[in-house]
Amino acid sequence: MTGDALHWRICDPGPDRKLGTDDDLNLSPPLHLPSNIQARIILHSRDYIYTFELPEQHLKEIAVPEQTYVMEFNSGRPRVAAFRGDQFCGYSHHALSGNMVVEKWPDYRRWQREARRTGR
């Protein structure tokens, strides 16, 4: 995930499960994950200092320009959970908060196909 212009940009690795390949999906939230995997969110920033928090997981990390931060956790059961983001300017930016959709593998694959077709 990359903080950019007070929004999160999400890069999903696509069917090959590898980032940086031709099948990557570049999307806006919500964040989709398959259930019961060891998830790894790589955080970057293009402009400001951001925070990314998964309250349900008790995890919070920072994203700073020109640096990489990693958040790892077990995605767990299928559900929709909130994520929160912030930017260190003192104002609230609602576009930095959203949902993490954890779904069973068949549903996750279906979402990937639809996202590839529609671009969202």
Image: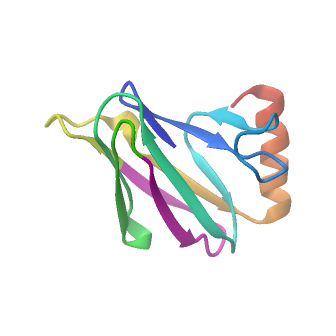
The percent position of residue 104, horizontal first and vertical second, equals: 77, 66
Say if the magenta span includes residue 80: yes
Horizontal side, residue 67 vs residue 38: left or right: left
Q: Position of residue 70 (x, y in %)?
A: 47, 58
Its colouring scheme is: rainbow
Q: Residue furthest left?
A: 90
The quarter of the image holding the C terminus is: top right
How many numbered tags mark residues here? 0
Which residue is the extreme one toward the front?
Answer: 66
When the figure is inspected, residue 37 is found, relative to residue 28, above or below; the finding is below
Q: Position of residue 95 (x, y in %)?
A: 39, 34
The main secondary structure of the magenta stretch is strand
Which span is picked out in magenta?
Answer: 68-84
Q: Return the residue nearer the eye: 49 or 98.
A: 49
What residue do we see at 52% from left, 67% from top?
Answer: 72
Q: Nearer the viewer, residue 11 or 109?
A: 11
Residue pictured at 58% horizontal, 61% vertical: 40
Q: Position of 117 compared to 45: left or right?
A: right
Residue 33 part of the magenta-drawn span: no
Q: Residue furthest top?
A: 5
**Residue 43 at x, y percent in the picture:** 46, 48
The image quadrant that residue 90 belongs to is top left
Q: Is residue 73 left or right of residue 91?
A: right
